Image (spheres, rainbow, N blue to C red):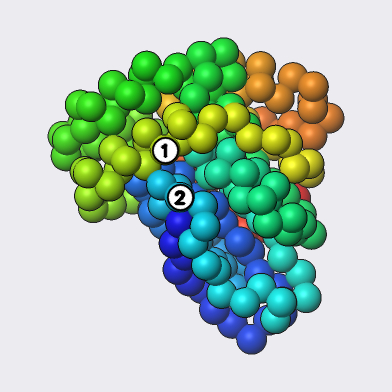
Amino acid sequence: MISRWLAQSDESTLTLVFGGWALGAAPFHGLTGGGNVLLVENYTSLDGPLPDLDQFDRIDLLAFSFGVASAAHWLTHTKFRPDRLVAVSGTLHPACTERGIAPEMIRATADQLSSVNFAKFCRRAGLSAEFPGLDIQHAQKELHAVIQRGSAPDPGFDRVWIPARDRVIPTKSQEAAWASASDMIKRVAGPHVPFRPGQSWEEWLS
């Protein structure tokens, strides 16, 4: 697990973002506000150090795609509790036929991973920005780690966003995964990457 700053300011608030597999900062390109924004990625392991979080008066955590389960595992291990916890386009069961992506499909993605196939994945996800670079061996290891780690305990999400046209983690799988939390769900008419330039971080944290 590694982290990098997407934005830094003198504000005492932090938006902590657990990103998705292999996409880096690309899904969040063009989002505004957020004060300090720290992106966490690379879920081959979840024990990488983060900057000192005690310096912030408020921390909101937004988890996207495979970052949802990864953040939940990390929160369970560290006992850290953000002021607000939001899930977008993901579930607590990343490698699950009914509530995530079938494990055999994840393995096939890893086994057949190439630059061409990754570009197809980015398009299927609805990524509109320039596609990020890819370290194939590292990305394969990360997928296998997600499968091995399995489902995560629910740390208590305050909001769940489900895109209507998700072709990566199917919309129906997300609906099944969050069936018991219907009061927290908001729906968005978009693909797996539902964020659009000009939107604010606050819109997604509401």
Q: Residue at 41%, 57% (x, y): give it.
A: 25
Q: Nearer the viewer, residue 170 or 49?
A: 49
> In front here: 206 or 149?
149
SS state under label 1: helix
Counting other residues with Cα less than 10 Å from the Cα at mark 2, is it few (<14), some (14-19), or many (20 or more)?
some
**63 relative to 75 in the view: left or right:** left
Give how far across and how far down residue 154 sits, in percent.
73, 36
Q: Position of residue 142 (x, y in %)?
A: 37, 42
Direction from residue 186 to residue 122 in the image, left or right: left
- x 24%, y 36%: residue: 118
Q: Quadrant of residue 72?
A: top right
**Label 2 amino acid?**
Ser
Query: Foreground: 140 or 22?
Result: 140
In the image, taking residue 50 as reference, residue 161 lies left or right, namely: right
Does dot 2 land on a helix, a strand or a loop?
Answer: loop
Q: Is residue 46 above or below residue 122?
A: below
Residue 11, given in percent of the width and then of the height, sits at 68, 81
Circles 2 and 1 in contact, beta carbons < 8 Å: yes
Residue 25 can be seen in this image: yes
Residue at the spot of label 1: 145
Instruction: Name which quarter of the figure residue 57 lies in.
Output: bottom right
Q: Nearer the viewer, residue 145 or 175?
A: 145
Q: Residue furthest bottom?
A: 10
Residue of label 2:
45
